Image (cartoon, grey):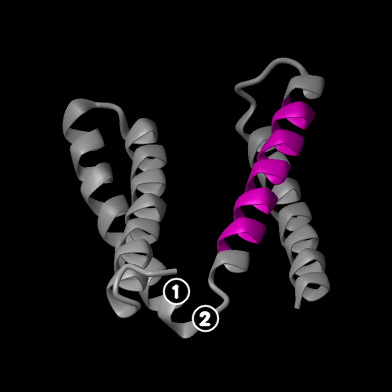
Amino acid sequence: MSKNLMARSIVIACAFGIIFLLINLFNKHESSIGMVIGKSILAALVFGLLYYTLFALMNTPERKIKFGVTIPICMLLAIIIGAVLGALKIGIIVGLIVGVLAAYIWEFISSHQSNGGKR
């Protein structure tokens, strides 16, 4: 699964980078083509890393439920709060981080409850 996930991550990250490059080229806000290419490569790398990390985490049905519940709820709340405060980008980032942390905390608590606190 790891090789398949890695290959899929690379293909999707490259596609995302190309789309990001085309959108920025047609937008014409940047004066330098080098700056646009650099931002596109950086966006593709970040997207590929996030894609691989999140799908590598979701290797069991229980984890899919935990991450599938916490991430959207935290993202929605953080986006609403970020929009009210005028910092939408920060709200998206904070929502993703809080959602992943909440899922890990939920998993930690449930694993300790299931085995009586013993490892």
- Residue receiving disc 1: 63
Q: CA distance from mark 2 to mark 1?
A: 5 Å
Task: Indicate whether residue 48 is drawn in magenta.
Answer: yes
The disc placed on residue 98 is none
Determine the image quadrant of residue 33. Answer: top right
Specify whether residue 21 is painted magenta.
Answer: no
Residue 27 spot, x, y in % from top left: 61, 32
28 with respect to 99 (left or right)? right
Q: Secondary structure at mark 2?
A: loop
State the residue at coordinates (69%, 52%).
Answer: 48
Q: Position of residue 71 (x, y in %)?
A: 36, 59
Quadrant of the image containing the N terminus:
bottom right
Please state which amino acid type lies under the numbered disc 1. Answer: Arg
Query: Decide: marks 2, 1 in contact (CB < 8 A)?
Result: yes
What residue type is disc 2 on? Thr
Magenta span covers which residues? Answer: 36-54
Residue 92 seen in the figure: yes
Residue depicted at 74% across the width and 21% down the height: 35
Q: Quadrant of residue 57?
A: bottom right
Magenta segment, principal secondary structure?
helix
Secondary element at image label 1: helix
Q: Residue 32: x and y, percent?
A: 76, 17
Q: To which residue does mark 2 refer?
A: 60
Please state the horizontal and vertical placement of residue 41, each as a whole percent of the image.
76, 37
Position of residue 24 relative to residue 104, above or below, is above
Looking at the image, residue 98 sits to the left or right of residue 81; the answer is right
